[in-house]
């Protein structure tokens, strides 16, 4: 569906690439997550994929053809839901949908059908005749989505659609994204909330400084990057003990808690427990298994996603 081959992109008068040798394949019908800190290049990549920025290198292919050779067609078959509100607050929900469907070239009776469908899908019927300025944050996010769905797109780009809304609204939006994916839509999803990526995405790419660090299914990434061992103890080991523990494995220490991030086998976990015992560190609880997406992200980028 989407193939990116060696994409490098510079902003005008800038010597450092915003995106550096991006290679990625997004299969039809997938729900693909893009993770990265602010400034990683996520929004720039989406701007190129949607045709908002021009890919002069012809590195992006949609359905086997260069994106640049089919821009008008792609803008009809792709929907973009931005992080910022993209509607007119002094118009009602229905008026906004009517305006944007006209811009996108929809004509009656399809135009009326799509407006009704989008209002229903996003559950905006009850507020359809109210000015968008009166909407809550969650309803404004829904209106953004409704506008992005007007053309019944095959590919939908969601750029952090749950920022700044309450848990109920976030849950509603995630459920609707899953509904769209189950209808066969190909979805590219960026978020600052890793738990969302883990909940809804089947594959993920982690970006930092314009480069893709890793990509693949969540299970592949977690299995590739070893086990995590979490030790709860009665007190924090002294400095000398921490040095010994940190000799073989990556260690994060906090009061009464030790986290080892690069265990390769269960035997490594057992050896660590023996070492703790030899250092007279009382252990109250042991947890081990695949590392979380957040731990993997921090290990690869040395920073929190919310930094």
Image: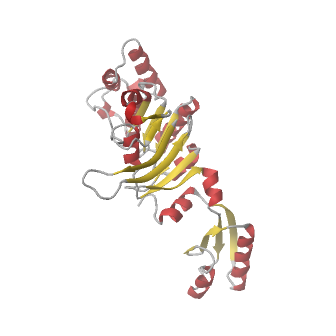
The answer to whether 137 is drawn above or below residue 210 in the figure is above
Q: Is residue 4 left or right of residue 28?
A: left
Depicted 53 relative to depicted 303: above or below: above
Q: Can residue 192 be seen by looking at this rendering? A: no
Q: Is residue 173 above or below residue 235?
A: above
- Is the C terminus in the top left, top right, bottom left or bottom right quadrant? bottom left
Q: Residue at x 40, y 27 (%)?
A: 73
- Location of residue 91 in the rendering, given as x and y in whole percent from the top left corner: 28, 27
Q: Quadrant of residue 202?
A: top right
* Residue that protrudes farthest toward the front in the picture: 57
Look at 71% across and 71% down and name the residue there: 269
Q: Residue at x 62, y 74 (%)?
A: 249
Closest to the observer: 219 or 147? 219
Q: Quadrant of residue 46?
A: top left
Closest to the observer, 73 or 122: 73
Q: Would residue 243 be visible to someone looking at this image? A: yes
Q: Residue 289 is drawn in which quadrant? A: bottom right
Q: What is the x, y in percent for residue 38?
A: 38, 55
Instruction: Say whether residue 54 is left or right of residue 5.
Output: left
Q: How is the image coloured?
A: secondary structure
In the shown orientation, is residue 132 left or right of residue 292?
left
Q: Position of residue 153 (x, y in %)?
A: 46, 28
Q: Position of residue 150 (x, y in %)?
A: 41, 25
Residue found farthest to the bottom: 240
Q: Is residue 32 above or below residue 284?
A: above
From the viewer's side, name the closer residue of 150 and 95.
150
Count of numbered labels shown in the rendering? 0
Q: Residue furthest top?
A: 109
Horizontal arrangement in the rendering, residue 306 relative to residue 183 (left or right): left
């Amino acid at each position: 569906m989407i193939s990116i081959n060696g994409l490098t992109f510079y902003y005008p008068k800038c010597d450092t690439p915003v995106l550096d040798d991006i290679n990625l394949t997004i299969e039809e019908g997938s729900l693909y997550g893009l993770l990265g800190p602010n400034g990683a290049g996520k929004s720039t990549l989406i701007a190129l994929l949607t045709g908002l920025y021009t890919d002069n290198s012809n590195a992006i292919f949609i359905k086997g053809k260069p994106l640049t050779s089919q821009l008008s067609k792609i803008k009809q078959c792709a929907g973009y839901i931005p992080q910022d509100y993209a509607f007119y607050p002094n118009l009602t929900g229905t008026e906004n949908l009517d305006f944007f469907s006209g811009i996108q070239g929809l004509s009656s009776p399809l135009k009326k059908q799509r407006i009704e469908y989008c209002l229903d899908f996003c559950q905006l019927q009850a507020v359809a005749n109210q000015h968008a300025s009166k909407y809550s944050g969650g309803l404004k996010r829904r209106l953004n989505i409704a506008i992005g769905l007007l053309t019944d797109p095959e590919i939908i780009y969601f750029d952090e659609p749950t920022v700044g809304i309450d848990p109920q609204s976030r849950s509603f939006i995630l459920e609707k994204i899953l509904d769209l994916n189950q209808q066969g839509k190909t979805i590219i999803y960026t978020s600052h909330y890793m738990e969302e990526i883990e909940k809804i995405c089947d594959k993920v790419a982690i970006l930092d400084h314009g480069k893709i660090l890793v990509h693949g299914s969540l299970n592949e990434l977690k299995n590739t990057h070893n086990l995590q061992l979490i030790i709860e103890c009665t007190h924090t080991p002294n400095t000398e003990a921490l040095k010994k523990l940190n000799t073989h494995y990556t260690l994060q220490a906090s009061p009464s808690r030790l986290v080892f991030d690069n265990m390769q086998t269960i035997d490594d976990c057992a050896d660590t427990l023996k070492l703790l015992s030899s250092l007279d560190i009382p252990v109250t609880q042991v947890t081990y298994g695949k590392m979380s997406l957040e731990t993997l992200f921090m290990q690869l980028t040395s920073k929190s996603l919310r930094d």
